[in-house]
Image (cartoon, helix red, strand yellow):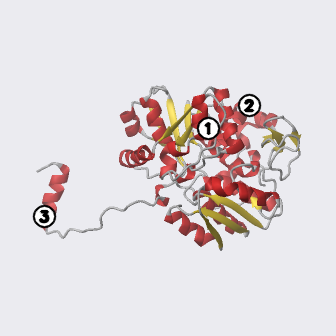
Amino acid sequence: MKAESLAQGLVCIDCGAAHALGYRLECERCRGLLELRYDIPRLAKTGPAILAGRGLWRYAPVLPIADPAHRVTLGEGETPLLECPHLAKELGVRRLLAKFEGPNPTGTVKDRSSATAVGAALQFGYAATSVVSSGNAGSSIAAYSARAGLRSLIFAYERASAPKLLHMAATTADLIIYKGVYDDLIPLWDGLVEERLFFDCGASRNAYKQEGKKTLAYELAEQTAFAPPDVVVAPVAVGETFIATARGFREMREAGWIAKAPLLVAAQAARANAVVRAFRDGGAIVPLKIGYTVAEGLAAGNPGKKGAWVLRLLREQRSLAGDAEDDEILAAQRRLARTEGIWAGPTGVATLAVLIRLLAEKRLDPAQTICVVLSETGLKTEAEPPSRSGTAFDADALRRLVRERLGTT
């Protein structure tokens, strides 16, 4: 028998108004954002024994998809939590972990939220989905919509990497390339959401879509025997991953599954750092007009209400926020690959680049256990390949080369 969902309703994060479960994108009283609430006393009573099965839907009790027939899957979740001893030593950190989301079906953390977004589209009777994407969300929503038998309209950034565009073109017949950046199109697209022409699979308002990423926290807790790291560095564009992860840890703490939630650190690209700027300046978020960043998935200059939510969480936790330049992100990508063999994309390694900065600035205690969320595989990266110019060898030439490279000449 499939596990039941313990979702009980929706609550406004601003005015606290309660709403029944349903497809709502904002509070009917104040237009604030909504978050799902669950039967925490039941979670406290049963403990982690309530979890059963494999992958993301192991956490069905704390996800909002009631009918098991609507629980769409491509085998997402159960991503590795990797020890990084070589890099930890280089950085002077006592213990460094990497939650690597690259093994997900489309190579990104987005698959977690696509599973619940498309599941909710089925739950609420929609025939079509849509998303505005800088790359990863588009390929993920397209794939999960195809899996569910739904049509998807994918609006993709014109400078998205070729592997992402190829994947989107393969999984949807409705791929639309837009000029400009994410912030240019999203207000227009949001207007169509109000007309209910398609199910909203975007990151800015839909509580059901966001919910899948909460499983990051639950997996991290299970993978550390419910003694999670002291610090988790999470990426922030609009803020979906950060918010969902924070709430997952909050639920487990309230249910008594963990003694303490990790300190969540927000990581942004310096070219799209509206949340970091507001956090540093002590004021509200001021939208930025942004250009291109190699961390394509972080390219949001106006994170809107969710950005304000991230800022609130950072201040409530007395946490940290940091950014990194594109060259720092690419350097971190190479360093991670060479030291630990983990090939993550630029969006994914922005967290590591920010961690390196925070450690250099002595803003984080290296004696702690620190985990970085690597949100995408490097196999979706578009970069200059190494030279394909080959060398012809005879036995002596091959021996000389090997001895030179190994320093045994």
Residue drawn at x 51%, y 33% as measured from the top left: 370
Point out which mark residue 62 bears: none
Image side of residue 327 versus residue 395, left or right? right
As drawn, 364 above or below 355: above
Q: Secondary structure at mark 1?
A: helix
Query: Within 10 angstroms of label 1, few (less than 14), some, or many (20 or more) residues?
Result: many
Tell me which numbered mark, 3 or 2, is placed earlier along the sequence. Answer: 2
* Closer-to-camera residue (301/8): 301
Residue drawn at x 45%, y 27% as measured from the top left: 366
Residue drawn at x 68%, y 32% as measured from the top left: 312
Point out which mark residue 397 bears: 3
Tell me which numbered mark, 2 or 1, is placed earlier along the sequence. Answer: 1
Instruction: Using the rendered image of the protein, determine whether residue 238 is visible from the camera's viewpoint.
Output: yes
Instruction: Find out whether the residues at labels 1 and 3 contact each other: C-beta distance under 8 Å.
Output: no
Tell me which numbered mark, 1 or 3, is placed earlier along the sequence. Answer: 1
Q: Secondary structure at mark 3?
A: helix
Instruction: Using the rendered image of the protein, determine whether residue 215 is visible from the camera's viewpoint.
Output: no
Query: Within 10 angstroms of label 2, few (less than 14), some, or many (20 or more) residues?
Result: some
Point out which mark residue 254 bears: 2
In this figure, which residue is indicated by the disc labeled 1? 221
Q: Position of residue 160 (x, y in %)?
A: 53, 61
Q: Position of residue 266 (x, y in %)?
A: 57, 37
Image side of residue 275 versus residue 71, left or right? left
Disc 3 residue type (three-letter) = Ala
* Closer-to-camera residue (230/159): 159
User: What whole-number distance in Å separates the C-alpha atoms at marks 1 and 3?
Assistant: 53 Å
Of the 4 image quadrants, the one containing the N terminus is bottom right
